[in-house]
């Protein structure tokens, strides 16, 4: 056998975005178990080795279901991470040995991007600790998980340029224009005047104003809106050109 052939395993890792009530972009992180590491260094992206009879897409759906308890979520494969040294840290090697009980010389991961309404109840069947983290407060993570998160942000920005309707997967069913503005700004990194944004939104017949307005807020109460996917499909207009 060629000595360059090694025990290489394939995993999936999932970056799950959510948008919280403070209008911040968040991701879901889980806690792994390493006794000699402090808790704040045990966070990681949810993921798993794929099973021998499992397609990578099926593995990603399994990971999401184990993570959230939600069966149907938007899911997009966006990149493979295969740096031969991505799992060379001693703590990561120790964790893999405990978690999988295999002689893993190298691990290649297929990364997925997913969107979750943050008001969904997270009911994990695998992890004891699952937390939302604001994207600008993500700690140092194991392997190359910080790099995966950064790449996922680049990917989602490409995604909304071609089909911005995915943005409504992160918003509540009824939302304010300010919520939509803040989420779009966070994802696209575009500097947009909110008055011009509001004017643009008003021209779209698939963003429908409701009779209901905000209650118990310290600022001027705003009207709620809803997104009509059927009307959008007939129009398919970009949100901001």
Image (cartoon, rainbow, N blue to C red):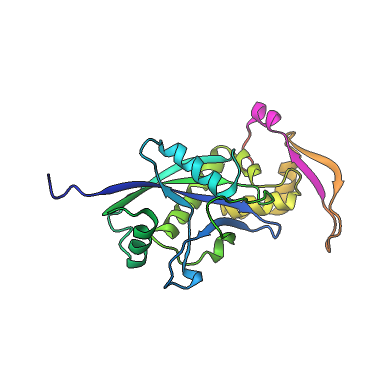
* Residue at x-position 84% and y-position 53%: 214
Residue sitting at x 25%, y 49%: 7
Of residues 151 and 66, the one nearer the viewer is 66
- Residue 161 in sight in this render: no
Q: Residue at x 31, y 47 (%)?
A: 9
In the picture provided, is 211 more to the left or to the right than 13?
A: right
Please state the horizontal and vertical placement of residue 109, each as a whole percent of the image: 37, 48
* Quadrant of the snapshot with the C terminus: top right
Percent from the top left, x then y, of residue 6?
21, 49
Looking at the picture, does residue 153 appear above or below residue 93? above
Look at the image and say whether residue 234 sits in the magenta stretch.
yes
Where residue 1 sits, quadrant-wise, is top left
Q: Report which quarter residue 35 is drawn in.
A: bottom left
Q: Is residue 21 visible?
A: yes
Could you tell me how many numbered marks the image carries?
0
- Vertical relation: 200 (above or below) 35: above
Q: Nearer the viewer, residue 194 or 225?
A: 225
Looking at the image, which is closer to me, 187 or 88?
88
Residue at image coords 51%, 40%? 61
Whether residue 70 is in magenta: the answer is no
Q: Position of residue 159 (x, y in %)?
A: 52, 42
Tell me residue 143's x, y (percent).
Answer: 38, 60
Q: Which residues are magenta?
A: 223-236
């Amino acid at each position: 056998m060629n000595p360059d052939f090694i025990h290489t395993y394939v995993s999936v890792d999932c970056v799950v975005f959510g948008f919280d009530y403070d209008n911040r972009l968040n991701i879901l992180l889980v806690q792994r178990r390493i006794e000699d590491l402090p808790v704040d260094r045990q966070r990681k992206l949810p993921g798993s080795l794929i099973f021998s009879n499992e397609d990578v897409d099926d593995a990603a759906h399994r990971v999401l279901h184990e993570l959230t308890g939600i069966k149907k979520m938007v899911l997009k494969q966006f990149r493979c991470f295969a740096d031969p040294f991505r799992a060379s840290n001693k703590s990561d090697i120790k964790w893999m040995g405990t978690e999988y009980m295999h002689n893993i010389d190298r691990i290649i991961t297929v990364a997925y991007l997913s969107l979750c309404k943050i008001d969904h109840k997270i009911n994990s069947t695998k992890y004891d600790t699952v937390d939302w983290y604001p994207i600008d407060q993500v700690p140092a993570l194991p392997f190359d998980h910080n790099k995966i998160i950064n790449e996922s942000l680049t990917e989602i920005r490409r995604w909304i340029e071609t089909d911005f309707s995915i943005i409504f997967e992160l918003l509540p069913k009824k939302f304010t224009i300010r919520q939509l503005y803040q989420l779009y700004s966070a994802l696209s990194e575009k500097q947009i005047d909110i008055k011009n944004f509001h004017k643009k939104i008003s021209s779209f017949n698939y963003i429908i104003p409701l009779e209901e307005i905000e209650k118990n807020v310290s600022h001027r109460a705003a009207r709620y809106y809803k997104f009509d996917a059927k009307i959008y499909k007939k129009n398919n207009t970009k949100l901001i050109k």
